[in-house]
Amino acid sequence: MSHDEQKISKAPFGTTKEGTAVDLYTLRRGAVEARITNYGGIATSLLTPDRHGKIGDVVLGYDHLDGYLKSSPYFGALVGRYGNRIANGKFSLNGVTYKLPVNNGPNCLHGGIRGFDKVVWQAKAVESGPALELSYLSKDGEEGFPGNLSVKAVYSLTEDHGLRLDYTATTDKDTVLNLTQHTYFNLAGKGDILGHEVFIDADRFTAVDENLIPTGELRSVAGTPFDFRQLTAIGSRIDQADPQLKLGHGYDHNYVLNHPAGRLDVIARAFDPSTGRILETLSTEPGVQFYTGNHLDGSIVGKGGWSYKARHGFCLEAQHYPDSPNKPGFPSVVLKPGQTYRNTIIYRFPTP
């Protein structure tokens, strides 16, 4: 395949427990190949070259749909209606209190029991992209959220070796919305990610309480293990006796990005010295959740028979801040009729 050749293909990927057929789409452009299923909009694999040109898969997941149906900590998924945590599974909007499913201690996490990661999206292949257009109608009251929400998520491969995700959404009733993407990366392809070096363009992070809910404080990263303003190995400070690290069992925190929300910028970089692979994350969002796979415990056997243990993958979930519906001081997550929600996330792999 020539460097500029691009294409998309489709194959069956199994059926849900309800009997709905699920497909797997393969997008190829140049040296990058992405496989995405319309179940949960999950990116099941992402192939990129290392410094020697050797192609490898840099994301965690399963070889078969059954794995995702049985147990998945949001591997590679589209997340909604609300990425991250909402305290006590409730929020108020226009004087009405909405109750949500609680699935993370006392919190509602990543949209509830059956979030966007567990639904079958309508899919349409776009040859010219190559791109995959996914759409879903989340009905009024689904998982407790108000409004009929029409969501579109378009995955495409860019000419500069990136997997791009463009979200748009509209509603017929005031609602709250925070969409993200939950890929677990491992630029070495296997083993832990403690040697990966990470940069995050943020001077502050949202400090959390014992339930990992932001206290409201935007805490400076200066002089703390949360300072990634220069490339720093993930493992260099992850086990320090820091109260915030102890609460998250490692990094599981939202960073307050320095860039203006709405502008597409590089917000984070990761570098794996062993392979030379570089990941640049671009986003229009005001925050990014940096999560280091702390709760993987070896019980999940993923692609190629690899047992995923703690810190075998990391996530950079571009998003609004956790619990924003209950924090008036945080950037608003309210979407009203007549408005269009937009959010772009790009995972780009510069040639090593």
Image: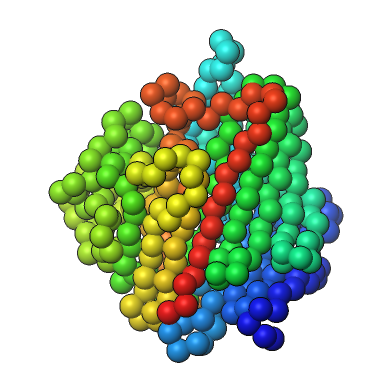
- Kindly indicate the quadrant of the structure image that contains residue 197: bottom left
Is 6 displayed left or right of 72 in the figure? right
Is 200 displayed left or right of 160 in the figure? left
Q: Quadrant of the C terminus?
A: bottom left
Residue drawn at x 33%, y 38% is: 206
- Residue 262: x and y in percent read 50, 41
Look at the picture and state if 334 lies above or below 103. above
Q: Which of 297 and 13 is in front in this view?
A: 13
Look at the picture and state if 148 lies above or below 279. above
Look at the picture and state if 158 lies above or below 218. below
- Residue 135: x and y in percent read 75, 47
Is 165 displayed left or right of 37 in the figure? left
* Colour mode of the rendering: rainbow
Q: Is residue 60 visible?
A: no
Q: Quadrant of the N terminus?
A: bottom right
Is 47 displayed left or right of 297 in the figure? right
Q: Which of 4 and 131 is in front in this view?
A: 4
- Residue 217: x and y in percent read 28, 31
Q: Which of 221 and 164 is in front in this view?
A: 164
- Kindly indicate the quadrant of the structure image that contains residue 238: bottom left
Residue drawn at x 49%, y 27% is: 332
Q: Can residue 156 be seen in this view?
A: yes
Residue drawn at x 57%, y 49% is: 344
> Total marks drawn?
0
- Residue 138: x and y in percent read 73, 36
Residue drawn at x 41%, y 28% is: 330
Q: Residue furthest left?
A: 223
